[in-house]
């Protein structure tokens, strides 16, 4: 074999290995893997019900550090084996611990964050862009019926009206501490109704409204601790897709003001970018 043929063979083999590496990483760490969004069916809900991990296996408890040793309790969702989606206002300190496979606050297996990416346009919740990606220091060991990722929509996909699911570790009432994973089933408002509610309740600029989803329930609402939790809906294929990230509410006007969530479909390209940026160093072949 000539030297030219040998060099050509080595280059070809190297290119094949590099391509195989990228394909393996895309499958191992990419969003919308086969099996995403599969769960046990939810039952009838009255004023919030205790959830089992089989029903919402993608929900995690996100704990962010604050000054003077206090902590922020939030929810989040698994989107890959080492990436969590949550609200930006939950992880401003960037010192984050994620508890997974648990229905109790700060219980169960946990993994610290190695990196936190907050959307650069985020200032405060009422101005939109309340989204962050938490990259874990190590991958979740495995996916099963109790722990698995949620599916994500396509970039720009419209959110249909109808029942949604909001599951989180927030308080079950104004005076009750949040300890257990609860869920309720609100209804997503039309974009026109949401526009009116956002203008009346928060005087929000029209340019910001396409970044948000409004949901309502006559007897249940998000409370402190539910921020960052996923707002999902069942698809016709029996899978759950995350359309929102719980962001804020006007608790003084419960029952009339909507729960407002970040519209995930407007940030799919940003999520993919954040995954690439935080995964460059570690996920090498």
Image: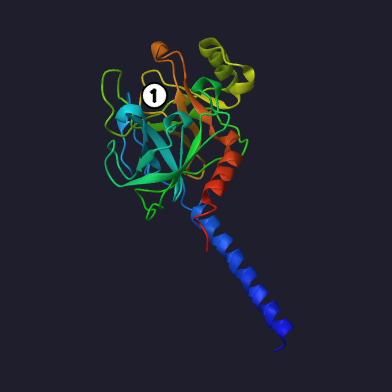
Vertical comparison of 21 with 56: above or below: below
Residue drawn at x 55%, y 25% as measured from the top left? 128
Q: Is residue 87 left or right of residue 57?
A: right
Q: Is residue 83 left or right of residue 204?
A: left
Q: Residue 179: horizontal and vertical position, in percent?
A: 26, 31
Camera-side residue of 164 and 150: 150
Vertical comparison of 5 with 229: above or below: below
Q: Residue 51: horizontal and vertical position, in percent?
A: 31, 36
Q: Which residue is mark 1?
A: 222
The answer to which quarter of the image holds residue 70 is top left
Does the rendering let one see residue 64?
yes
Camera-side residue of 216 and 102: 102
Where, quadrant-wise, is the N terminus in this rendering? bottom right
Residue drawn at x 58%, y 36% as measured from the top left? 267
Q: Residue 30: horizontal and vertical position, in percent?
A: 53, 51
Secondary structure under badge 1?
loop
Farthest front residue? 68
Q: Residue 266: horizontal and vertical position, in percent?
A: 60, 34
Farthest bottom residue? 1
For the residue carrying disc 1, how many other residues have a C-alpha within 10 Å: few (<14), some (14-19), or many (20+)? many
The answer to which quarter of the image holds residue 49 is top left
Vertical comparison of 175 with 161: above or below: above
Does the rendering let one see residue 32?
no
């Amino acid at each position: 074999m000539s030297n030219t043929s040998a060099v050509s063979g080595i280059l070809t083999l190297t290119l094949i290995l590099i391509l195989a590496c990228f394909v393996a990483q895309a499958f191992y760490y990419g969003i919308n893997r086969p099996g995403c969004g599969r769960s046990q069916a939810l039952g009838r809900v009255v004023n919030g019900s205790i959830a089992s991990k089989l029903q919402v296996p993608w929900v995690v408890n996100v704990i962010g550090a604050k000054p003077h040793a206090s902590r922020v309790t939030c929810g989040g969702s698994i989107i890959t084996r080492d990436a969590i989606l949550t609200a930006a206002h939950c992880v401003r300190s960037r010192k984050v611990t994620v508890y997974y496979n648990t229905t109790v606050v700060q219980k169960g297996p946990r993994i610290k964050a190695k990196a936190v990416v907050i959307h650069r346009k985020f200032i405060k919740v009422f101005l939109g862009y309340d989204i962050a990606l938490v990259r874990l220091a190590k991958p979740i060991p495995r996916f099963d019926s109790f722990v698995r990722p949620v599916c994500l929509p396509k970039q720009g996909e419209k959110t249909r009206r109808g029942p949604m699911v909001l599951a989180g570790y927030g308080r079950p009432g104004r005076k009750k501490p949040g300890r257990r994973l609860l869920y309720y089933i609100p209804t997503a408002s039309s974009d026109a109704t949401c526009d009116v509610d956002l203008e009346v309740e928060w005087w929000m600029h029209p340019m910001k409204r396409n970044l948000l989803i409004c949901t309502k329930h006559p007897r249940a609402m998000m409370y402190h601790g539910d921020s960052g939790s996923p707002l999902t809906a069942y698809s016709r294929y029996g899978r759950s897709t995350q359309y929102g990230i719980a962001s804020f509410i006007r608790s003084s006007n419960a029952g009339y003001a909507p729960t407002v969530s970040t519209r995930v479909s407007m940030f799919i390209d940003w999520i993919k970018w954040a995954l690439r940026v935080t995964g460059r160093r570690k996920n090498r072949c």
